Amino acid sequence: MQPYEIYALKYAGPFTSSGALLMWVKDWEKTVERNYYIWCIKGPDAVIVVDTGVSPQLAGARGLAGYVNPREMLGRIGVDADTVTHVVLTHIHWDHANGVGLFPAARIYLQEREYRFWIENSLASRPSFRFYTDDESLSCLAALKDNRRLALLTGDREILPGVECLLAPGHSPGLQAVAVPTVRGTAVLGSDCAHVFRNFQEDWPSSFIFDLAAWMRSYDKLRAKVASPELLFPGHDPLMAREYPRVAEGVTRLV
């Protein structure tokens, strides 16, 4: 099996907050940074985009600092968003799913329980849940129901040779991570199962919790999957943009 390369594409940021945003009920007095990313998995025969970022319309409405259209970010590494045929949505929070309409030819891989909660469960319209989502992505995904472009997964599933979506709930009802064979062994894009590397290292979640017990079990699952701890990547850590080889403006190669 040919190994894949994994790229982190910073499409917005940095943003600052209390440390307690990223480390649940810790570091209230600290000011920390986070970035917003999508990821690209490139193999000899396939390109997979993980998460879709935010559309220009929502970025403008929210005043996202440092925003670059995810389509432009992919173009910097030679990927045409119009020809991308595989997109994994790790979960349906606005900063990960709002840009789903930017990929008109892609098959969208999403956990069924994630879809059912955010699209079909009336609880998702309550203010404390509505905070996480946006009308644009919800409407787009609802319109894809029963369309072959939407692949709803029920648990762990290999979607391409060696590339596996892993159900990892806790931050959201059906968050999924992505396991990837690389030259250094199996790497895992954990998305918001951890916002920063410290979450994994200290066995401590961020402040955005759907199910804490499930989150702890997801940590165990993802740690058992990776070839080594440094190949387990979080969703928002600025280190991904600073500590890895830069291949283009805003783009680094993680492995």
Image: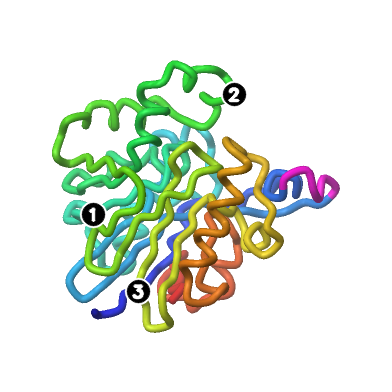
Q: Along the line of sight, which residue is nearer the eye, 223 or 241?
A: 223
Q: Is residue 82 left or right of residue 130?
A: left
- Which residue is the site of mark 1? 86
Secondary structure of the residue carrying tag 1 is strand
Q: Closer to the N terminus: mark 1 or mark 2?
A: 1
* Residue pictured at 25% horizontal, 73% vertical: 43
- The reply to whether residue 35 is in sight is no
Distance of label 3 from label 1 (alpha carbons): 17 Å
Q: Is residue 24 above or below residue 196?
A: above
Secondary structure predominantly adopted by residues drawn in magenta: loop
Where in the figure is residue 225, as x and y percent of width and height?
A: 46, 67
Q: Is residue 79 left or right of residue 232?
A: left
Q: Is residue 32 above or below residue 243?
A: above
* Residue pictured at 50% horizontal, 61% vertical: 222
- Which residue is the site of mark 2? 128
Q: Along the line of sight, which residue is nearer the eye, 21 or 14?
A: 21
